[in-house]
Each structure stands twice: as structure tokens, then as C-alpha cells.
Image: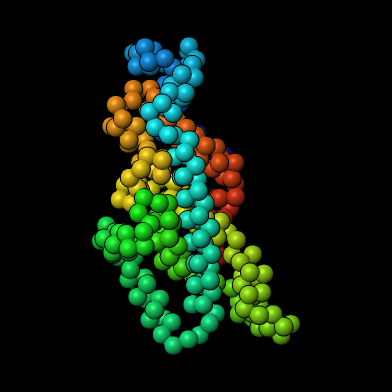
Amino acid sequence: MTGSRQRRRWTTGSIVLDVVLFVFAVLMIAPLVWLVSTSFMPSTEAFGLPPSWLPIPFTFENVLEVEQYIPFWRMFGNSVLLAVATTLGSLFVSVLAAYGFSRLRFRGSRLMLIVMLGALMVPAQLLVIPIFVMMRNLGLMDTLAALWLPALINVFQIFFLTQYFNSVPRELDEAAVIDGAGHGWILFRMLVPLSSPAITALAILAFEASWNNYFGPLIFLSTPENMTLPLGLVTLQSGFGSAPAVVVFAAITLVVVPVLVLFLVFQRNFVSSIASTGIKG
């Protein structure tokens, strides 16, 4: 009887928890559903009360009008190019630096790593002035290079991968050296595959950070053709005649939905990489 009561109690608790989580999930997803639905409605039907959750009547006019206010697809390409360059470049540099701190013993390596970690405590707003002066002296203002070049050095990625590489047994390195392997083989043929969960998690976080970055483009970019999507959305709302709200919603949908679909496609890989990283670390 006691076991039956405990099972019944656990079942009731599980049902209550599922209901609470479902309610919170609905509250979180409702604004996104309304945003997407409003993007495909005529402006006369978009803001009625009660709100309509289905785009009836359905129209593509709002999506087509986005290009009339800003060079949206050019900005979309700039965001993709910047995010890919930042993600791949920063990971490549971080992998090399992490291997040096983890596997190569040289004088001052620990002190150098501590100093780099200290840089994490410096706000990004304080670093933008010397970076701005540097990019101006290099003639890179109003170019994407002014954004992805400074992003190649990612202290958090270096520290994270250094700790992950330290968790890999050094006996594997010794066995590889006995077989005639060099540093390049050990890094790219052994440590990188073994660290794929950590690298995958860092890649997703780096791509998202670059995709949503607004502060950097605001400082370094001025020409609409060179802007990225976060800056373009603000320009769409407040500049060039201020587009209607439904057009702004359509642009936001075009920005959010592709990344959301990409996350849903790779959701299992992302969750498994985070879980594996937590266990491994």
C-alpha cells in the first residue's frame, strides 16, 4: 500500500509539473507565433482585438516591401559572411592557442593565460576605442573586416578549450609521438576529434553572438550596403522614412526564423555537445 501511494504521489507530481511546464512553454512561444502570423497579414488586420493567431487573409506583401526600405538581402549576406568568418576564424585561433597552453611548456605560459583571463573582466565598451583607432589606421572602417578581425581572439574559447585539452590523457600524446606523430597530427587528428562536443558548443555560441551583435556594427559600419541585420532592423524602424510595423515584423521574422530552424535541425547535436562537455569537463 505504501509503494502504491508513493507511485500515485509521483504520478500526480509529474502531471502537475508537466502542466506547469506546458503553460510556461505556451507563454514563451506565443509572442513568436504572433510575430510570424502578423508578418503575413495585411496592415488593416494585423492589430485587431482579440489578436489573430493565424494569418487570415495570408499575404506576402509585407515581406516583399522590406527590400523597398533597406537592402535586406545584402545585409543578410553580410551577417552570414560575418558570422561564418568570426566562428571559423576564432575557433581556429583558439584551438591553436589552447594546444599551446595545454601541451607546450614554455616560460611564462601560466602567467600569460592568467593575464588573458583578466581581460575578460574589462568591459567591451572600454576596448572599442583602441580597436576603433587601430581599424581606422588600417583603413578598414566601414568594412566587415573591422568586425571579424578583432573577434579572432576569443579569450573565453581559449580558456575553455585549454581546460578541455587538459582533461585528455597525455598518454595518448606519448603514444602518438612514439608512432612518429608531430604536433599537427596530435592536434588535428587526435585532440580536435576528441574535443568535438566542446568545439560544437563553442561554434554555436560564437555564431549566435555574431549574428545578434549590434554594438560592433553600430560603431564600425555606416553604409547601408555594409550593415548587418541587427543594425538594419533598427534602421528599418527609425530611418529611411520609418517602415510600417507589419514590414518591421516581416523583417524580424526573416531574421529569426532561419536561425530558429537551424537550431531545431541541430538541436540534438547541440544538447548532446553541451551534456558531453559538462560531463567531460
Residue 222, position in %: x, y?
Answer: 33, 45
Residue at the location (51% across, 77% down)? 100
On screen, residue 250 above or below 58: below
Residue in the image at 63% along x and 69% along y: 188
Total marks in image:
0
144 vs 99, nearest the viewer: 144
Identify the coloring. Answer: rainbow
Q: Position of residue 237 (x, y in %)?
A: 31, 31
Report if residue 276 is visible in the image: no
Residue 86: x %, y % from top left = 47, 56
Residue plotted at (39% across, 32% down): 70
Q: Nearer the viewer, residue 103 or 17?
A: 103
Q: Is residue 168 left or right of residue 106?
A: right
Q: For the point 52% across and 51% down, which residue is it? A: 84
Q: In the image, is residue 98 above or below residue 90?
A: below
Q: Residue 122: where, in percent of width, then height?
A: 28, 64
For the N terminus, which image quadrant?
top right
Say if residue 261 shows up in the picture. Answer: yes
